[in-house]
Amino acid sequence: EAGVTQSPTHLIKTRGQQVTLRCSPISGHTSVYWYQQALGLGLQFLLWYDEGEERNRGNFPPRFSGRQFPNYSSELNVNALELEDSALYLCASSLEGRQETQYFGPGTRLLVL
Amino acid sequence: AQSVTQPDIHITVSEGASLELRCNYSYGATPYLFWYVQSPGQGLQLLLKYFSGDTLVQGIKGFEAEFKRSQSSFNLRKPSVHWSDAAEYFCAVGPKAAGNKLTFGGGTRVLVKP
């Protein structure tokens, strides 16, 4: 069974640009979560999507947004990139009815110059 | 608010020796508890989880963890470490509510000496 997949694996952007990160959950999983792992800040919860709706949001500005598609895949969009947005962005998914257990993808490493 | 503390930022252990990683949490009730491992450049892999019942939980790769309510702790142990166990380990808590966010500790980086 394929795990959570994320694309791209790495990308480099400049300040002020916009970026879109993609995530495909494990087959059968309906919830998708996004986390940011930045140097010195640890792993922080960004967003939770379930059944196409944003269900919960971490303490991040509105320029961090996303969506979930009917096939349960998800995108994370970050507008007006800032240097401190450089981080590993991790996507996780969970099974309907078993949303307490999250399985993570390999992450997308974003560098903002 | 819930929080997780991993007091040890780095631990160095010899191959074949035992390993114990500490985790303390703060939460109003008994949360769901997790240990994840992150190898260099990789995502997080779930090692084990505790929801209820037996306080000693067995996980993958020979790891186990013990939940101690009185100490608000969920320490991870392995009796004999292998070089491939060198990685960063994260303890996490999640409320007993569907789909809620995980709160992670700061992580403990484990180095394994030959």
Image: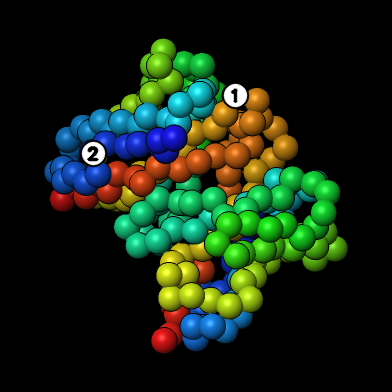
Crowd tier of the residue under label 1, counting other residues whose Cα lies within 10 Å: few below 14, some 14–19, many 20 or above: some
**Rendered location of residue B87, percent (x, y):** 44, 67
Is residue B68 depicted above or below B2 in this figure?
A: below
Residue A33's spot in the image, x, y percent? 48, 34
Residue of label 1: A96
As drawn, is A92 to the left or to the right of A79? right
Q: Secondary structure at mark 2?
A: loop
Answer few, some or many: residues within 10 Å of disc 2's Cα (few below 14, many 20 plus, some between 14 and 19): some
The residue closer to the viewer here, A30 or A40, is: A30
Going by the numbered disc 2, the residue's amino acid type is Pro
* Residue position marked by numbered label 2 in the rendering: A8
Q: Does residue A80 appear in this view?
A: no
Determine the CA span between mark 1 and mark 2. Answer: 26 Å
Q: Residue at x 51, y 24 (%)?
A: A28
In the rendered image, the quadrant that contains the N terminus of chain A is top left
Residue A51 rendering spot, x and y as whole percentages: 51, 16
Give the residue displayed 32% in from the left and 37% down from the top.
Answer: A6
Q: Please tell me which residue lies in front, A101 or A37.
A: A101
Q: Is residue A99 above or below residue B114?
A: above
